[in-house]
Image: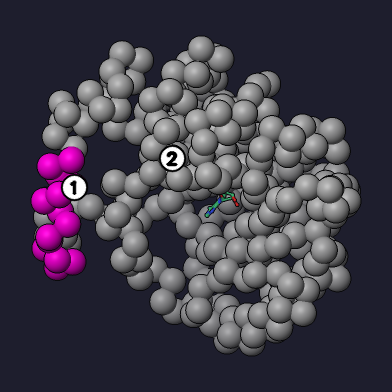
């Protein structure tokens, strides 16, 4: 499974595209895991994890025992541990401690290449602070083996400036550039989800980006075409079986009594194995018509 963990339900920023600018949403979410609860979470699901994603829908660097979460992942031999963060609360020491604990990857969110757009779209963030973190990555890459992924969520107003990415950020400081389209996630402050105005130059900007990424040894992950963005992803059929979201307010399956039962006890109780087995032989068309649909569209990680 891919375990996606939010240890604390809060954020230091108010990005305009994010539900943290939706007052109703912010009122509803709160809480953080105690160390005991976290140990229990690890015991129940970490053994099953091929990947541990720390930080999924909120900001993980606000969590006091963050390093401990990475250590727990290592203890349970999770092969790949990644942290998704806005990076504004990181410093050299904190980054080094996370690397010492065994973190494999930093996924860093970026919503604007230039200072003006960065600080506009990522409310309360500091462009200078953000750049410092990339300088630290560049230095620490000489001593540690880890990856840095930039996750750029684009909209019609911040897409074109991607062309200048490498004049603002040094290609030595990151390994992947992932660009993903804005989705409607609640009643957010920025709410223009129409990307049709990008149709004309999406391909040419993507082509230039591909070349720049190649020249800088950066792997680009981007939608091939702006017109096919909302199509179904066939990998999502596996979602129900592989995506495990855990936070102080949610634990993977609603009926999983995680504080009392083990993964095996739960699986036996709900006949999880049988369900997976039966679905192996179902074709895609049948999956689409199955009442309990197996595909989900929105992934907040
Ligand atoms: C909600 S944040 C949580 C993790 C962490 N706070 C961060 O920003 O990296 C996870 C990702 O959601 C993305 N995101 C925010 N608003 C979005 C939107 N409206 N559509 C698609 N992705 C969005 C962010 O860019 C970020 O990479
Ligand atoms: S995108 Fe991440 S950093 Fe920005 S407000 Fe949402 S949770 Fe916070």
- 93 or 8, nearer to the observer: 93
Is residue 218 positioned above or below 60 on the image? below
Q: List the residue tagged with mark 1.
A: 276
Which secondary structure lies at badge 2? loop
- Residue sitting at x 51%, y 20%: 38
C-alpha span from label 2 to label 1: 17 Å
- 85 or 145, nearer to the observer: 145
Magenta residue check for 258: no
Is residue 77 positioned above or below 50 on the image? above
User: Would you say the magenta stretch is mainly helix, strand or loop?
Assistant: helix
Q: List the residue tagged with mark 2.
A: 49
Q: How busy is the neighbourhood of tag 2: few (under 14 within 10 Å), some, or many (20 plus)?
A: many
Which secondary structure lies at badge 1? helix
Is residue 216 positioned above or below 187 on the image? below
Q: Residue 137 in the image: x percent, y percent?
A: 81, 50
Total numbered labels: 2
> Is 238 left or right of 96, judged from the image as shown?
left
> Is 32 left or right of 112, judged from the image as shown?
left
Q: Residue 209 in the image: x percent, y percent?
A: 69, 78
- Residue sitting at x 58%, y 42%: 81
**Residue 230 seen in render:** yes
- Residue sitting at x 48%, y 16%: 37
> Is 132 left or right of 61, judged from the image as shown?
right
Q: Earlier in the sequence, mark 2 or mark 1?
A: 2
Q: Which residues are magenta?
A: 273-286
The image quadrant that residue 85 belongs to is top right
């Amino acid at each position: 499974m891919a375990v996606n963990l939010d240890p604390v339900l809060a954020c230091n920023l108010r990005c305009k595209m994010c539900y943290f600018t939706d007052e109703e949403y912010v009122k509803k979410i709160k809480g953080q895991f105690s160390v005991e609860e976290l140990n229990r979470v690890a015991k129940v699901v970490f053994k099953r994890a091929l990947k541990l994603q720390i930080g999924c829908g909120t900001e993980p660097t606000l969590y006091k025992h963050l390093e401990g979460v990475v250590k727990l992942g290592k203890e349970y031999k999770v092969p790949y541990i990644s942290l998704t963060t806005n990076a504004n609360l990181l410093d050299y020491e904190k980054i080094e401690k996370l690397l010492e604990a065994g973190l494999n990857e930093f996924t860093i969110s970026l919503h604007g290449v230039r200072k003006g757009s960065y600080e506009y779209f990522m409310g309360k963030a500091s462009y200078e602070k953000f750049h410092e973190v990339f300088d630290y990555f560049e230095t620490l890459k000489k001593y540690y083996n880890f990856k840095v992924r930039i996750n750029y969520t684009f909209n019609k107003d911040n897409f074109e400036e991607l062309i200048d990415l490498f004049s603002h950020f040094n290609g030595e400081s990151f390994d992947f550039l992932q660009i993903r389209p804005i989705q409607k996630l609640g009643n957010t402050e920025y709410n223009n989800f129409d990307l049709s105005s990008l149709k004309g130059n999406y391909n040419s900007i993507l082509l230039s980006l591909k070349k720049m990424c190649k020249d800088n040894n950066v792997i680009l992950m981007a939608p091939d075409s702006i017109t096919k963005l909302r199509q179904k992803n066939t990998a999502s059929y596996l979602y129900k079986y592989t995506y495990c979201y855990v936070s102080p307010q949610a634990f993977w399956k609603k009926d999983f009594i995680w504080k009392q039962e083990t993964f095996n006890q739960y699986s036996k109780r709900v006949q999880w194995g049988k369900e997976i087995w039966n679905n192996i032989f179902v074709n895609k068309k049948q999956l689409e018509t199955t009442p309990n649909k197996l595909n989900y569209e929105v992934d907040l990680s």
